């Protein structure tokens, strides 16, 4: 149903109302796209023009030097970042793929179990427990998660001893590894909410008919639920990919090896390099980098390159995403 009915649209008051609504919507679009425009124009500005006042909406002398320097850094041209940028991109890809390959199946199977397997009484209780983790602020769970990754599976500062002995329990330190980022992300209560909201709409007659034919629960999930759930899987895959690819705080805490940093943390380190050169004399490698034209334009260029995989993911899943917006789980 349209916001404004077709009857009476030719009236001056209705035209004014429609014009006002259209103008407000276009203003929202412009405000949303302006940061993207500013990031792009900054990436093609020469270094001397970036800090120019007043700032310009379009560079007077556009240059792709920042992008050329990016590929030079990717080939290991300088030691400013210690490793080529392709190493950091590979780290982001490994972390993102690991989270998606583990989190989505686990969350989907949990949602299927809560939706179709348990009795209503236990389903309600387990569902509240599962989504109750959404009420815990991330800042509260940082220290316990860090400790459990350091002394897995004990979220304690010190490893407890085996009773009646001085021998500590076996434990493993996941810090400074990909698993330190992947393991805490194997479950998502928000994705569980999306999956369960969709699985609840699947007619139980289909499930019962398959059970009468002798199909196992995994067979039902693979042959009936999965083909019907492409929209919700597309939505969850996009949300999971974008959040894992752009993850910053947790990798910064649990990874201290430069070689294992994802691209988001590398951008933070690169920004610190650019800011530090304004306070203390730059190191020779950093000075060469700045003299060659790499400044905040390079930071914006790398940011644009980092956002390309998320855009590609959206393009690949756009049809299913548009269908998924209409799911009952979003209402």
Image: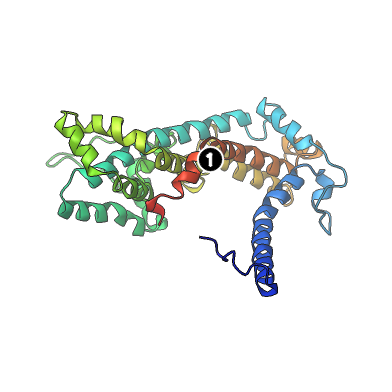
Residue 132 higher or lower than 230, as above or below: below
Residue 24 higher or lower than 162, as above or below: below
Q: Crowding near pointer 1: few (<14 within 10 Å), some, many (20+)? A: some
Kindly indicate the quadrant of the structure image that contains residue 178. top left
In the picture, measured across the screen, residue 34 lies left or right of residue 312, that is right
Q: Report x, y in % for residue 19.
A: 69, 66
Kindly indicate the quadrant of the structure image that contains residue 7. bottom right
In the displayed orientation, state which residue is furthest to the top.
Answer: 75
Q: Report x, y in % for residue 277.
A: 73, 47
In the picture, measured across the screen, residue 213 lies left or right of residue 297, that is left
User: Which residue is painted at 68% across and 72% down in the image?
Assistant: 11
Residue ID for mark 1: 318
In the displayed orientation, state which residue is furthest to the right.
Answer: 60
Q: Report x, y in % for residue 284.
A: 75, 36
User: Which residue is painted at 17% across and 46% down in the image?
Assistant: 118
User: Which residue is painted at 75% across and 37% down in the image?
Assistant: 66
Is residue 117 visible from the viewing direction of this image? Answer: yes
User: Which residue is painted at 39% across and 42% down in the image?
Assistant: 185
Give 15 or 101, whichever is nearer the viewer. Answer: 15
């Amino acid at each position: 149903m349209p916001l404004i009915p077709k009857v009476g649209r030719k009236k001056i008051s209705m035209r004014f109302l429609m014009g006002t609504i259209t103008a407000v919507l276009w203003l929202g679009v412009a405000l949303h796209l302006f940061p993207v425009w500013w990031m792009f124009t900054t990436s093609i500005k020469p270094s001397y023009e970036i800090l120019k006042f007043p700032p310009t909406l379009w560079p007077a002398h556009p240059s792709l030097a920042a992008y050329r320097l990016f590929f030079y850094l990717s080939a290991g041209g300088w030691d400013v970042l210690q490793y080529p940028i392709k190493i950091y991109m590979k780290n982001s890809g490994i972390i993102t793929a690991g989270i998606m390959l583990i989190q989505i199946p686990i969350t989907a199977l949990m949602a299927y179990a809560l939706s179709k397997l348990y009795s209503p009484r236990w389903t309600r209780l387990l569902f509240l427990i599962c989504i109750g983790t959404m009420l815990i602020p991330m800042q509260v769970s940082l220290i316990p998660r860090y400790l459990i990754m350091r002394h897995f599976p004990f979220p304690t500062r010190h490893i407890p001893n085996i009773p009646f002995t001085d021998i500590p329990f076996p434990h493993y330190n996941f810090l400074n590894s990909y698993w330190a980022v992947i393991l805490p992300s194997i479950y998502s209560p928000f994705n569980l909410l999306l999956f369960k909201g969709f699985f609840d709409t699947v007619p139980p007659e289909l499930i019962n008919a398959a059970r009468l034919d002798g199909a196992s629960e995994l067979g039902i999930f693979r042959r009936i639920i999965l083909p019907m759930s492409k929209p919700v899987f597309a939505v969850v895959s996009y949300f999971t990919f974008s959040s894992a690819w752009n993850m910053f705080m947790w990798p910064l805490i649990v990874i201290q090896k430069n070689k294992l940093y994802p691209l988001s943390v590398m951008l933070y380190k690169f920004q610190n390099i650019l800011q530090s050169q304004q306070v203390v004399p730059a190191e020779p490698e950093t000075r060469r980098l700045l003299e060659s034209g790499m400044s905040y334009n390079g930071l914006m260029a790398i940011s644009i390159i980092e956002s390309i995989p998320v855009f590609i993911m959206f393009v690949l899943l756009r049809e299913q995403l548009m269908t998924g917006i209409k799911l009952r789980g979003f209402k």
